[in-house]
Image: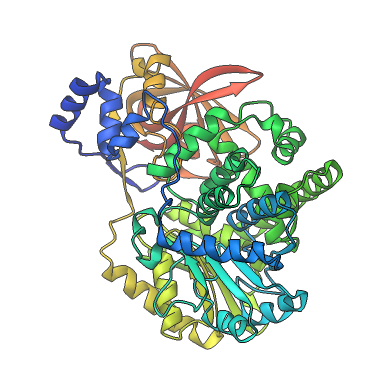
């Protein structure tokens, strides 16, 4: 079925025998069984549906973790100064904040540094270390960076500064010559955890380090930072991440975390914190500092216990995020989406010399979401070009960027499955573009213009019991999206425009059942045109959500697409 927005929709193929067996074995409903089978839940994930599971440290006897713990314990015992170097996004800031909390709790000498995106560039570089070693650290711990920093690590070794890398970005041999490296992508026996972000790896490392040093801090109090980084770094909410999410959301009391509570209060939020709050409210606010010249602010906020610092940084970050939204809108308004659509390229590579380099990542994400294709946005940075990439779930953009670095096409860069960044000479832009497109075509990545819904349902299924069944596989997010359904033969009864962007509608079935619906960001789109003017019955692709307004809950259909 081709939709009004030009997408091809088809029902997801699910083995009915497996569905029936799951229903029989666990007494699950048909829809819950279908969701579990379609998402290929593992036994531990199925177990979390009807009971609580403890979160255990899976790296207890891991060689890389043990080597890293010995390195840091030795440094602590000798009272040697430690430097924490984190990336300027939420993952880097959250991981850095965990280390700050630990080192403050044992009263150890340390400092941290979050690079400025424009002045310092990305990650651990020789130029940056030339500055940092002036503070005379004996150990530099890199979190969410360092996996491609061979030259920089060699510089530290020459200056007798030890190094530890805790990262999840792509890493190829020869590895940086650090004293210890924690990275599942090293293929050193724990590659199955390559879906964990740097904050998660840092959390489990610190958990073991705290036990080894017999420290008093309860690192579990900051598990919310792990979930925050997981969501903001677009890691899948599956397997161990699912368990982290369930344990965190169940036990987290926001009033006991002053930084997050302050952000909630300043945004007039009173609900129990959700995945959407982390990804769409808190994450963008924290990331705004790194995008617009205040890269330290997020770490200063998350690691602080001082009321004045927390209020100041929260207020400034919210203002920066509002400024970011304005700049983003101006940039998006200049992009010719129709031209890109007509070109119909497999990978979208958009070059504009005047985009603020702090926003190229978020613009790449918007293009990826709109076209459902890997998207790269490139801008001018002094005499060079800087690029940021966002990818679809089954194409590892970090791998291709790391390979292009190894082949000398780019000057530096790195990334993971879903996102990457890089710097290159202007003369190499066309070569890089050809290389990425060729790699994508070789990868046999599926056609991303084909979308699937879980099943067709009647409007009568739009009820609380059905919704409660769907919620049993929460939390929803990357790797476990909100289920999508097909509802046929609905008539558009009433429409209204919200904030000049969204369309609220009442849909009515042939049996007279009314469905409250909303279509986000649909003004000036094909979906919006049909909702505002189509008179005949229409088929709707949508997701069932709970809308909370004035502390009252009501079910609502979020319209994803329309089929005439």
Residue 25 lies left or right of residue 502; in this view the side is: left
Q: Nearer the viewer, residue 314 or 7?
A: 314
Residue most extreme to the left:
17
Q: Nearer the viewer, residue 433 or 89?
A: 89
Q: Which image quadrant: the C terminus?
A: top left
Total numbered circles: 0
Q: Residue at x 36, y 72 (%)?
A: 437
Q: Relative to 268, does residue 291 appear above or below in the rendering?
A: below
Res. 168 visible in picture: no
Snapshot quadrant of residue 260: top right
Q: Relative to 105, does residue 250 appear above or below in the rendering?
A: above
Q: Residue at x 46, y 84 (%)?
A: 409
| Residue 210: percent from left, percent from top | 59, 49
Q: Relative to 528, does residue 112 appear above or below in the rendering?
A: below
Q: Nearer the viewer, residue 501 or 359?
A: 359
| Residue 335: percent from left, percent from top | 57, 62
Snapshot quadrant of residue 359: bottom right
Q: Residue at x 25, y 39 (%)?
A: 12
Snapshot quadrant of residue 61: bottom left
Res. 387 visible in picture: yes
| Residue 159: percent from left, percent from top | 65, 84
Residue 317 lies left or right of residue 70; in this view the side is: right
Figure colour scheme: rainbow
């Amino acid at each position: 079925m081709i939709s009004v927005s030009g997408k091809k929709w088809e029902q997801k193929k699910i083995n009915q025998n497996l569905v029936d067996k799951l229903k029989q074995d666990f007494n699950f409903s048909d829809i819950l069984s279908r969701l579990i089978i379609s998402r290929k839940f593992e036994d531990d994930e199925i177990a979390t549906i009807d009971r609580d599971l403890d979160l255990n440290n899976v790296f207890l006897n891991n060689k890389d973790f043990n080597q890293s713990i010995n390195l840091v314990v030795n440094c602590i015992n000798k009272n040697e100064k430690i430097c924490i170097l984190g990336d300027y996004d939420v993952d880097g800031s959250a991981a850095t904040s965990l280390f700050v909390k630990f080192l403050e709790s044992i009263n150890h000498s340390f400092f941290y540094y979050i690079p400025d995106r424009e002045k310092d560039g990305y990650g651990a570089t020789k130029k940056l270390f030339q500055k940092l070693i002036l503070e005379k650290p004996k150990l530099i711990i890199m979190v969410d960076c360092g996996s491609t920093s061979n030259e920089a690590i060699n510089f530290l070794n020459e200056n007798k500064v030890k190094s530890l890398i805790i990262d999840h970005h792509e890493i190829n041999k020869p590895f940086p010559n650090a004293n210890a490296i924690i990275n599942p992508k090293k293929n050193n026996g724990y590659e199955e955890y390559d879906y964990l972000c740097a904050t998660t790896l840092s959390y489990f490392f610190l958990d073991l380090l705290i036990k080894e040093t017999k420290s008093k801090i309860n690192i579990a109090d900051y598990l919310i930072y792990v979930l925050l980084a997981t969501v903001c770094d677009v890691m899948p909410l599956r397997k161990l991440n699912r368990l982290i999410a369930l344990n965190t959301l169940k036990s987290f009391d926001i009033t006991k975390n002053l930084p997050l509570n302050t952000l909630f209060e300043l945004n007039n939020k009173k609900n129990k914190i959700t995945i959407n709050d982390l990804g769409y409210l808190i994450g963008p606010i924290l990331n705004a500092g790194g995008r617009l010249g205040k890269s330290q602010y997020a770490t200063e906020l998350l690691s602080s216990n001082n009321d004045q610092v927390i209020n100041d940084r929260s207020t400034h970050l919210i203002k920066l995020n509002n400024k970011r939204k304005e700049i983003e809108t101006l940039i998006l308004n200049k992009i010719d989406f129709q031209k890109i659509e007509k070109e119909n390229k497999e990978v979208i590579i958009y070059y504009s010399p005047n985009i603020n380099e702090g926003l190229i990542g978020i613009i790449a994400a918007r293009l990826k979401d709109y076209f459902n294709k890997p998207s790269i946005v490139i801008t001018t940075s002094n005499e060079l070009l800087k690029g940021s990439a966002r990818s679809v779930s089954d194409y590892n953009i970090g791998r291709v960027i790391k390979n292009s670095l190894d082949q000398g096409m780019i000057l530096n860069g790195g990334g993971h499955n879903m996102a990457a960044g890089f710097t290159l000479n202007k003369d190499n832009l066309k070569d890089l573009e050809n290389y990425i497109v060729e790699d994508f075509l070789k990868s046999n990545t599926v056609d991303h213009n084909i979308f699937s819904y879980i099943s067709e349902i009647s409007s009568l299924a739009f009820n609380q019991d059905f919704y409660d069944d769907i919620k049993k596989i929460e939390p929803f997010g990357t790797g476990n999206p909100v289920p999508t359904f097909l509802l046929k033969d609905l008539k558009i009864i009433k429409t209204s425009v919200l904030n000049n962007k969204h369309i609220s509608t009442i849909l009515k079935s042939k049996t007279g059942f009314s469905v409250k619906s909303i279509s986000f960001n649909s003004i000036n789109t094909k979906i919006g045109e049909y909702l505002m003017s189509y008179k005949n019955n229409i088929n709707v692709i949508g997701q069932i959500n709970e809308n909370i307004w004035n502390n009252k809950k009501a079910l609502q259909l979020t319209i994803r697409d329309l089929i005439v």
